[in-house]
Amino acid sequence: MKPAPNAIPSKWAWHHRTLLRLRKDLLKARDEHEHAARVPHERGGADLLDVAEDEVELRTLRAEMAQEDTELGEIEAALKRLQKGTYGICEVTGEPIAEARLRALPWTRLSKNAAVRLERANGRRPA
């Protein structure tokens, strides 16, 4: 019996479930942040400190939303790689990504060595 098209191999079942859960959690957080960003801030009678605090809070929310969008993009890309059968393969080297790395970063597209090389090339200290 042939597997169904786009079926996720059983060796990636944990990763698939984890990515789906992360996506659900991020979508919920993003919706909450979008709602909070749309709520008008009280301006009447507010002193300058209140206005400044509101502005900092709004900027923080926008930064969190941008980070969530980036993370959602990575998760969606990982889910597509699962469907295409390319999940767990480094996009730079073509080598398998270590299981421990995929457990820690289930959306990763790079092996640790490739990530370190890329970070060094971009002038950042490797994580």
Image: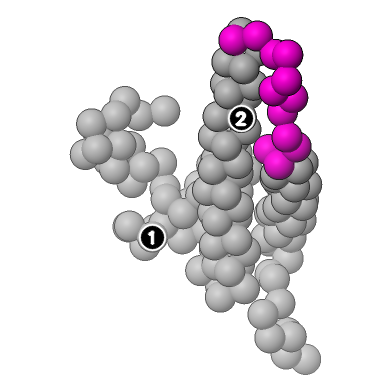
Q: Residues within 10 Å of mark 1 (few under 14, many from 20)?
A: some
Name the side, left or right, on which 46 lies relative to 100. Answer: right
Residue 42 placement (x, y as % from top left): 74, 24
Separation of marks 2 and 1 at Cα, in angstroms? 36 Å
Residue 112 placement (x, y as % from top left): 41, 41
Q: Is residue 72 above or below residue 43?
A: below
Q: Is residue 94 above or below residue 33?
A: below
Residue 56 placement (x, y as % from top left): 57, 21
Name the element at disc 2: helix
Q: Is residue 58 above or below residue 25?
A: above
For badge 2, the amino acid type reads Leu
Asked if one can make out residue 78 in the rendered structure from this viewpoint, the answer is no
Name the element at disc 1: loop
Q: Nearer the viewer, residue 69 or 89?
A: 69
Residue visible at 59% across and 10% down in the picture: 48
Q: Which quadrant of the structure image shows residue 34?
A: top right
* Residue at the extreme bottom of the image, as rendered: 1
Residue visible at 62% across and 17% down in the picture: 51
Q: Which residue is mark 1?
A: 91
Q: Which residue is mark 2?
A: 58
Name the side, left or right, on which 109 lies relative to 12. Answer: left
Residue 1 placement (x, y as % from top left): 77, 91
Figure quadrant of the C terminus: top left
Query: Would you say residue 84 sits in the magenta stretch?
Result: no
